[in-house]
Amino acid sequence: MKKLFLITALVATTFGAFAQNADLRRKIEVTGIAEQEVTPDIINVSISLKEYMNGKTKVTISTLEKQLEKAVAEAGIAKEDFTINSLSSWNYQTEKKKNPDFLASKQYGIKFRDLNKFDQILSKVDAKGIQSTNIDSYDYSKINDIKNALKLKALIAARDKAAFLVSGLGDKLGSVLNITESDNSSFPQPRNVMFMSKAASADVAPVSDIDVRKIKLSFQINAIFEIK
């Protein structure tokens, strides 16, 4: 009998504690979304140069690199926006001694803030030494400011939606209990850039199909509010 009393008391105590800890507040969960498209003002481009044979003379990677460095400097590109990404051989000098016909290639990264300088730079580099060009990524200089503004806008949209729904039931909206953020932004995909430089004719101007594709910033806020 005493054991039964103790078990009953324990169950009653556990249930009472659970009832005290349970959140019995009335709640509403809603979603707010805010979106905006921006035109990238920063485009990261990689340029690959490769040695080639001009008859019996090799046009070396160092010659091509000097042309590119000079063109980049004349275009006003900051030093920190021009980098060397990779060399085709881990030990170029050794490879060149072992195989005199070895043609090295080298890849460079340039951060463009003015796309008009793209053709300007490539037109001053030996076209036969340009192996490929590629857009690696897009960015926007004030992207963090816009992201923060959109998050706040999405949160306010969620609050307004919740207040509207709750008022339809004759209740009032209370404090926010939980906020969850989702970033659904999409950036243009990296792609190859076609470049045609003047070769034989001085009348043929360099052209490219480089263009600016918009960045879509999209934020979703899931919020839980108390209903008073």
Image (cartoon, rainbow, N blue to C red):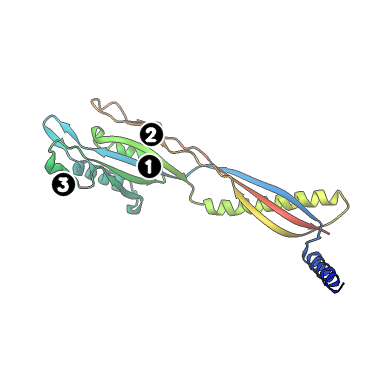
**Real-space CA distance between mark 2 and mark 3, rounded to the nearest whole angstrom:** 31 Å
What's the mark number on residue 93? Answer: 3
Which quadrant would residue 19 be assigned to in this image? bottom right
Amino acid at circle 3: Gln
Residue under the point 60% across and 44% down: 36
Check disc 2: other Cα within 10 Å, few if <14, some if 14-19, many if 20+: some
Q: Taking 201 as reference, is 169 left or right?
A: right
Q: Is residue 78 above or below residue 45?
A: below
Q: Which residue corresponds to mark 1?
A: 45
User: Residue at horizontal 32%, vertical 35%?
Assistant: 132
**Marks 2 and 3, the one that precedes in the sequence:** 3
- Residue named by callout 2: 193
Q: From the viewer's perspective, is 94 left or right of 174?
A: left
Which amino acid does the dot numbered 2 rest on? Val
Which quadrant of the figure has residue 99?
Answer: top left
Q: Are marks 2 and 1 in contact (CB under 8 Å)?
A: yes
* Element on which disc 3 rests: helix
Q: Position of residue 216 (x, y in %)?
A: 56, 42
Find residue 10 and report its image quarter.
bottom right
